[in-house]
Each structure stands twice: as structure tokens, then as C-alpha cells.
Image: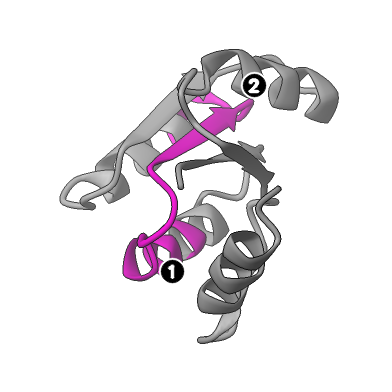
């Protein structure tokens, strides 16, 4: 099972990095993260610095502001052989069992 995660973001780099660190601890069922950033250049630089050392396949793409545009841009960048796509907001957080429950649900209902 291969899953892509698309995260549109704008001017919330600290929350985004917190989410990315949660994803890094739970990377057992997704294989790419696409961050579509419509922030100014300073936030982009901060995000790139904080991503150093994180062991995930992350694409950071600059965009104009618009959630719909950012999501559509992310869709065009998804790996073509992935099975699933998930959209996350940059300020979401998960409890410890969230990812295992999502994986279990997907595997059970994969039709």
C-alpha cells in the first residue's frame, strides 16, 4: 500500500514542523509528503532548515495562496504508482493510535 500526503500551508511553519515530526514517527504506510507552501520566503527558509535530518520523502513546492489551487497542484505532483491520497491541514495533530487505525481500516476495506 502506497499513500501520498498533501499538506497545503501558509504562515504556520511551527505547526507544520510539529505535524511533520508526528508523521516521521508513523511513516509505516505512506511514502511521500507534498507540502504546498504559499508563505513568504522567510517561512520557506525556516521550513527547509527544520526539515534537515528528517528521514521522509518530502517535496516542498512554492505556490500562490488558495487552498483549492494548492491541493490541485499537490495532486499533479503525486507519485503515479501510489494507491491512496490524503489531505492534511498544517495544524492537525494525531493521537498515538491514529495511524495504526487508519492503516487497519484501509487494509480491511481495500476494494
Decide if residue 53 is on the left or right side of residue 75: left
Residue 105 on image: x %, y %? 66, 69
Dot 1 or dot 2, earlier in sequence: 1
Relative to 94, does residue 50 appear above or below in the rendering? above
Relative to 62, does residue 71 appear above or below in the rendering? below
Q: Do the residues bearing badges 1 and 2 touch, measured as CB atoms within 8 Å? A: no
Residue 109 on image: x %, y %? 70, 60
Instruction: Give the number of the disc on residue 75.
Output: 2
Secondary structure state at the residue bearing disc 1 = helix
Label 1 belongs to which residue? Answer: 22
Decide if residue 40 is on the left or right side of residue 65: left
Specify the quadrant of the image occupied by residue 104.
bottom right
- The residues colored magenta run 19-43
61 or 77, which lies in front? Answer: 77
Extreme-front residue of the structure: 111
Residue 100 on image: x %, y %? 51, 76
Specify the quadrant of the image occupied by residue 26.
bottom left
Amino acid at each position: 500500500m502506497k499513500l501520498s500526503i498533501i499538506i497545503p500551508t501558509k504562515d504556520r511553519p511551527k505547526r507544520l514542523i510539529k505535524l511533520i515530526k508526528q508523521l516521521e514517527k508513523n511513516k509505516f504506510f505512506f511514502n511521500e509528503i507534498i507540502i504546498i507552501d504559499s508563505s513568504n520566503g522567510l517561512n520557506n527558509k525556516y521550513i527547509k532548515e527544520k526539515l534537515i535530518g528528517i528521514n521522509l520523502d518530502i517535496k516542498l513546492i512554492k505556490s500562490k495562496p488558495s487552498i483549492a489551487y494548492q491541493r490541485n497542484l499537490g495532486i499533479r505532483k503525486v507519485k503515479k504508482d501510489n494507491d491512496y491520497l490524503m489531505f492534511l491541514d498544517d495544524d492537525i495533530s494525531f493521537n498515538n493510535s491514529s495511524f495504526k487505525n487508519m492503516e487497519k481500516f484501509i487494509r480491511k476495506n481495500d476494494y
